[in-house]
Image (cartoon, coloured by chain):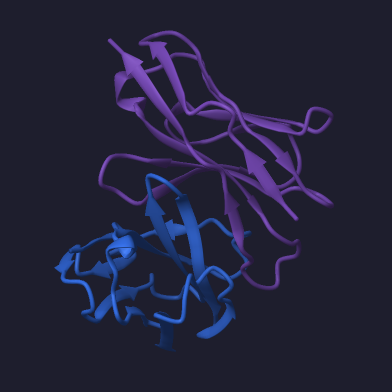
Amino acid sequence: AQSVAQPEDQVNVAEGNPLTVKCTYSVSGNPYLFWYVQYPNRGLQFLLKYITGDNLVKGSYGFEAEFNKSQTSYHLKKPSALVSDSALYFCAVREGTGYSSASKIIFGSGTRLSIRP
Amino acid sequence: DAGVIQSPRHEVTEMGQEVTLRCKPISGHNSLFWYRQTMMRGLELLIYFNNNVPIDDSGMPEDRFSAKMPNASFSTLKIQPSEPRDSAVYFCASTPQGSTDTQYFGPGTRLTVL
């Protein structure tokens, strides 16, 4: 079965510093991987996804994610953190492959990112 | 585009009462997902539909929970009878066909069962 793990419950970074939120995955076959962000009292918002192609995926708000097949990781990164990036971040993997219809997405436990001024 | 619409946004009820949560997916989306989020258990998938048909309801915790999707623009999640441990934020999400599953979440319904 597909699964993702987010080893850190909380990440603290000073504004202007680079940030990394870690994610590792376990899948059979090619992985479809996602990052979502949740701001307080809001639903989750899609940030970026890896399906195939370049290992470095660029997404919204300056975020990028690096896919590493040998390490089965899909870490979220940003070169320079902003206080407004403070939120809950979820890594996710799609269960199943193919484009015919939607499949279950398995979410990680979430990592709370806190950016201090 | 109004996004995914959920109602009510907040619901407070007493144990034993019936609760109905509602969701309107984004027009043209053909898959709909119901999730529950709590501090203790994180984000749990309860059930999802493709083209109005339930595909996987293995996450529905008990027979007290039921979900329907009578048409492409409306779904309900019902809890009868409700219990205090059902208190959570319930999210609905929808996905367009062929999107490789980028999900669009609603704002959620915060349910409190006293």
Q: Quadrant of the C terminus of chain A?
A: top left
x and y percent of residue B39 in the render? 37, 44
Q: Is residue A95 above or below residue B15?
A: above
Q: Quadrant of the N terminus of chain A?
A: bottom right
Tell me where residue A73 sits by quadrant: top right
Question: Residue visible at 30% across and 25% down?
Answer: A84
Q: Number of numbered discs present?
A: 0
Judging by colour alone, the chain drawn in blue in this rendered image is B
Front residue (pair A7, B86): B86
Question: Residue visible at 38% across and 70% down?
Answer: B26
* Residue A80 relative to residue B49: left or right: left
* Residue A17 relative to residue B11: left or right: right
Q: Is residue B76 above or below residue A64?
A: below
x and y percent of residue A85 in the render? 36, 26
Question: Residue visible at 29% across and 48% down?
Answer: A42
x and y percent of residue A94 in the render? 66, 55
Chain A on-screen colour: purple
Question: Residue visible at 40% across and 60% down?
Answer: B36
The answer to whether residue B12 is seen in the rendering is yes
Q: Is residue A35 above or below residue B90?
A: above
* Residue A102 relative to residue A42: left or right: right
The answer to whether residue B3 is seen in the rendering is no
x and y percent of residue A54 in the render? 74, 34
